[in-house]
Image (cartoon, rainbow, N blue to C red):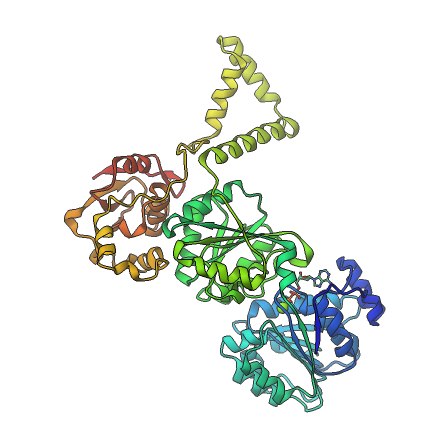
Amino acid sequence: MTSSNSPAAVLFADLGLPQPLLQSLSELGYEKPSPIQAASIPILMEGRDLLGQAQTGTGKTAAFALPMLTNLDPKKKHPQLLVLAPTRELAIQVAEAFQRYSRNMGFSVLPIYGGQSYTNQLKQLKRGAQIIVGTPGRVMDHINRGTLVLKDLEALVLDEADEMLRMGFIDDVEWILKHTPESRQIALFSATMPKEIKKVATTYLNNPEHVKIETKTTTASTIRQRYSLVNNNQKLHAFARVLEVEDFDAVIVFVRTKLATVDVAEKLSARGYRCQALNGDIPQNQREQVIDKMKRNKLDILVATDVAARGLDIERISHVVNFDIPLDTESYIHRIGRTGRAGRQGEAILFVTPRERRLLNAIERATNSPMETMEIPSANDINKKRATDFKELIKTTIDKSDLEKFHQLVSEFMQEGDHAPETIAAALAYIAQSNKPLFEAETEFKPPKREFDRNDRNDRGRGRSSRDGNRDSRDNNRDRGKRKKGPHKAEDMRTYRIQVGRNDGIKPGNIVGAIANEADLDSKNIGHIKINDDHSTVDLPKTMPKAMVKKLQKAYVCGKPMGLSES
Ligand code: ADP
Ligand code: MG
C-alpha cells in the first residue's frame, strides 16, 4: 500500500505522459500532480488494477483520466473505456474533464445518463464513442438494449464508489462489471472504504495496488475554518450578517434536509441574494442548470444537502457554510472540500447550537485542527461595511460614468435654490437607497427573545424540547400547508393584513421568511396565511411585542413594502 502525506515532488513530465497530454495540462495551468495523481498515474499506465482512496477535491479525475488516455488508442472507434459515476452531474463533470485533458488527442467522449433522450445517445454511440462516462442505470439500459457493446472494453473506472453504494447502485455496478471482458483493467476510486466496496474490490479487481492519501493536511492547509455558537432560531439572522461583511465569490450552504434547502434559499432570496436550493427532489436537468448558473456567475449561493452537492466542482466557491452541523465528521470534510479547490484559499464557516458542541469537538479531533471562533458581526460592523461600499460605489460612478447631464441638472438646482452641495448630495444619497434603509437600526445581535411566547415556555416545562432543537424551523415549514389546524389557538392569534398579494407573486413561504427574518420570530409562531390577489393575511400571536410589530411595519416582502396593519 502506498501512503502519502507529503506533496509529490514529481512533475507531470516525470510520469511519462505523452506530449499532447502535457500540452493540455500546461494549457489548463496544472503545475504538478497532486499526491493521488503522482501515486496512481504510474500504476494505471502499467495497466494494473488500482484501489484509490482520497478525499474529494484531491484530483482523482485526472488520476485516472491521464493514464487511461495515455493507454487508449484514438484510432479504434469502439468503446474502450467506461467510467461509472453516481450522479448525472458527476458524469458530466468527468466527461468534461476527459474532454479538456484529451483536447490535443482526438477522442470522442460521451456522457450517458438517465433523463436524457435515448435518440441522441444512440446517435452518438453509433458514431463510435470511445470513452463513455455514465450513471449505472442508463449504462445498464444501453447494455441490455445492445446499444452499448463492451466486448472490446479495455478499462473500467468506478468513480466515487462509496457514493454509488450509498445511492443503492452497488448491484447495478456489479451487474455491469459482469458484462465486461475479464481482461479489462479496473480502477476503483472512493473517498471512504466501507466493507461493501472492499468486497467489490476483492471480487473484481485483479491483484490491485492500494493507494491511500491521508486527508488531514488537505483540510487544514488551504481552508480557514471558523465556527459560531448560535441558537437555532438565530442562525438565519446570524448568517445574513456574516454574508454582509464576508468577502465572498460564491457560497455553498449545507443544511440537513431537503425542506431546509428550500426554506433557507427562499429566505436568502427574499433578502436579495442570487440564491437557489439544490436537493435530490429537484429534477436532474434543473439541478444541472442550477450548477451551470453558478459556474457562469449568474448565481451566488446554493443551499444544498450533502447528497445533492457531493463531488461538485465549482471553482468559484469561496465559502462553505455549514448552516446545520453535519452528523458525521466525514461529511464535514467532504463539505468543506467544495472550497479551497486546487490549492486556493477557502473559507469554511460552521454554525453550532449549544447542544451540538460535542459534534464540534469530534470534528476538531478528526481534522486535527482547532477551529477559530467567529463573532457574529454587529449592526455597527454592518453599517460600516455598507458605508464603505456606498463610498466605493460613488467613487466608481465618478470614475466610470457619463455624468454630464446630471452635472447640468445639479448646477441648475443650485442656482434655483440656496443649498449647500453636501446637502444636495446627502438628499441624493437618501433617494439612492430607494426603499431599503442603508443602515441597520438594531444595535446588537441579541440572543432571541422568545419569552413572550407562552406556549413555548410550557412546552419546555413539559419536556417537549427534549426533541432535537434542529427540527424547529424546518418541521414547522412542513406544517405550512396544514397551518389552519396548526398548534395555534384562534383566540391567541391576531390577523394582520399585508399589502402584497398574488399579483405580486407572493407565496406563503415569502411571508414566513420575511416575518421570521425581520422580526426574529420563530416560524413556529406564525399562524394561518391567506393569499389574495391584491393582499394577504397572516395570523400572529397576540402576545407579540409592539417593537416586533413596528419592525414588521417597515419590513419588505418580495421587494415590496409589507405594509403590515391589523385587519
Ligand atoms: P476529486 O475527484 O478528487 O474530488 P477533481 O478531480 O474533481 O477532484 O479535482 C478537483 C479540482 O482540482 C478540479 O477543478 C481540477 O481541475 C483541479 N485539479 C486536479 N488536478 C490538479 C493539478 N494537478 N493541478 C491543479 N489543479 C488540479
Ligand atoms: Mg471526483
Describe residue 522's horizontal placement relative to residue 109 as left or right. Answer: left
Ligand 2, seen in the image, is in the quarter at bottom right
Quadrant of the rendering where the N terminus is positioned: bottom right
Residue beneath the point at 29% across and 57% down: 480
> Which residue is more in the foreground, 565 or 463?
463
Tell me where residue 271 sits by quadrant.
Answer: top left
Q: Position of residue 225 (x, y in %)?
A: 56, 53
Describe residue 7's horizontal placement relative to residue 526 as left or right. Answer: right
Tell me where residue 154 sits by quadrant.
Answer: bottom right
Using the rendered image of the protein, determine whether residue 70 is visible from the camera's viewpoint. Answer: yes
Quadrant of the rendering where the C terminus is positioned: top left
> Which residue is more in the foreground, 283 or 247?
247
Tell me where residue 55 sits by quadrant.
Answer: bottom right
Q: Position of residue 384 (x, y in %)?
A: 52, 32
Using the rendered image of the protein, determine whether residue 179 is visible from the camera's viewpoint. Answer: no
- Say how many tags the image has: 0
Q: Position of residue 405 (x, y in %)?
A: 59, 21
For this orientation, the residue located farthest to the left is: 491
- Residue 381 lies, with reference to residue 169, above or below; the image says above
- Residue 229 lies, with reference to residue 185, above or below; the image says above
